Each structure stands twice: as structure tokens, then as C-alpha cells.
Image (cartoon, rainbow, N blue to C red):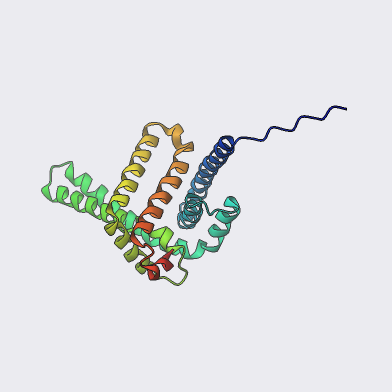
Amino acid sequence: MKDRPAKKQPSEKRIRLMALLMKITDFLLVGLISLVCSLPVITVGAAAAAFYTVGVAMVRGEEGSVYKEYFATFKAEFRRMTKLWLVLLLIQLLIAANAVFYFWLASGGAALAQFGLGVCTIAALFLSFACAFLFPIYVKNDDMRGIDAVKISMFLAGRQFGWWAAKTVVQTALFVLVWFFPFLIILVPGALLFWNSFCYDRAFRKQFSDNRPESTNII
């Protein structure tokens, strides 16, 4: 009886390709899950907490059961993150309401209205800067106050300005793409998950290196 030929083992390159495709799939699916979980608006805080917890873990190659971890974080952090999100949402609504009011006044060419629009723009940019790394910092520190997390987020964004700028530029570009090509909504959340998590991880590692171990407890 002839010996059966041994099954050909997949090459190392093929294994790496499969692993890469699986990780890309995870990023896309977790991004879509985050989008769906954010639709009620009030749940954005918990979704962002789970979004960054899973995203940073995947970027670092430390993920376990991605989807189980996502929903576990969403549930565990819901109350705490919702309080933070509602404060941020209120601030955003105030800025938006003032911007609409001043835009209406600016149609008449009022100088005060144009000044008001400028102030609203600066306020929106400052809020974006202050909250750039807020959720991934806050989610890892149960005893941290929201205002302290904002301060650390501002510190990190200021000291690692390049990573904040890269995160903001790409994020804005992706939103613009969705505006003009709505079908890309399927891909953009996953791309945001990877890029935002990657920028945060690199900014954190560069700022809080091994020579400052006392600072690593914020993640």
C-alpha cells in the first residue's frame, strides 16, 4: 500500500497574509459595531471606550477575544463614560447653537457676527485638541476624574503635536470622503479605529518612555 503524500504545510508568507486579513476584518467589523452602538447618541461615550480599548490592544498585538472584550468594556464603562460624554455633548451643542446664530447674523454682514463665528471655530478646535486622547486615557483609570483626563489628553496632544495633527488631518479627510461618497461608511469606521488607536499608541509610547515608568499608569 502506497504511503499517502504528506499534506503541504502553508508557507510562512501565507500564514502572515491570513493573519493580516483576519486583523483587517476585525478592525472593519469592530468599527461597524462601534458605529451601530453610537447611533442612539447617548451611547457614544461607552462605544468610544470600547472602541479604543479594543483598538489599542489590536494595534499592539495584545488582543484576546476582540468582540467579547468590546461588549464587556461597553457594559462595564457605560455609566461612567456616558456622564463624560453628556458633558462633552452639551459643550458641542452650545458651540453649534452659537455658530448657527452667528452664521445667521453674518448673512447681513455684521462684523460682530463674523467675530462670533471666529470664536466658535476656535472653541471647536480647542475642544478637539483637548479631547484628542481623552477616551483611551479615561477608560483605563477608574479613579480618575474627567477633568484630570482632559488635562492629560491636552498635555499629550501638546507634547506630541505631530501625532495629534496626523490623527486630526486623516480623521477629517475620512469624514469628508464619507460626505461625498456615503458608501464608504462601511470602511471608514474601521480605518478610524486603526488610525486613531495607532496615533494614540505612538504618541503615548514616545512621550512616556521607559525612563518615566511612573507615568505609565495612565494607560
Q: Is residue 3 above or below residue 199?
A: above
State which quarter of the image contains the N terminus. top right
Give residue 156's position: percent from left, percent from top. Answer: 32, 60
| Side of 63 where 171 appears, left or right | left
The residue shown at (22%, 45%) is: 103
Q: Which is nearer the eye, 21 or 46?
A: 21
The residue shown at (31%, 53%) is: 128
Q: Which is nearer the eye, 218 or 177?
A: 218
| Side of 99 where 66 appears, left or right | right
Image quarter of residue 93: bottom left
Q: Is residue 147 above or below residue 198?
A: below
The residue shown at (51%, 53%) is: 54
The residue shown at (59%, 54%) is: 64
Q: Which is nearer the eye, 6 or 88?
A: 6
Give residue 50's position: percent from left, percent from top. Answer: 50, 55
Image quarter of residue 211: bottom left
Give residue 163's position: percent from left, percent from top. Answer: 32, 51
State which quarter of the image contains the C terminus. bottom left
Observer able to see residue 133: no
| Side of 205 where 122 appears, left or right | left
Of all residues, the one furthest to the front in this rendering is 2
Of all residues, the one furthest to the top in this rendering is 2
Observer able to see residue 126: yes
| Side of 122 where 168 appears, left or right | right
Give residue 215's position: percent from left, percent from top. Answer: 38, 68
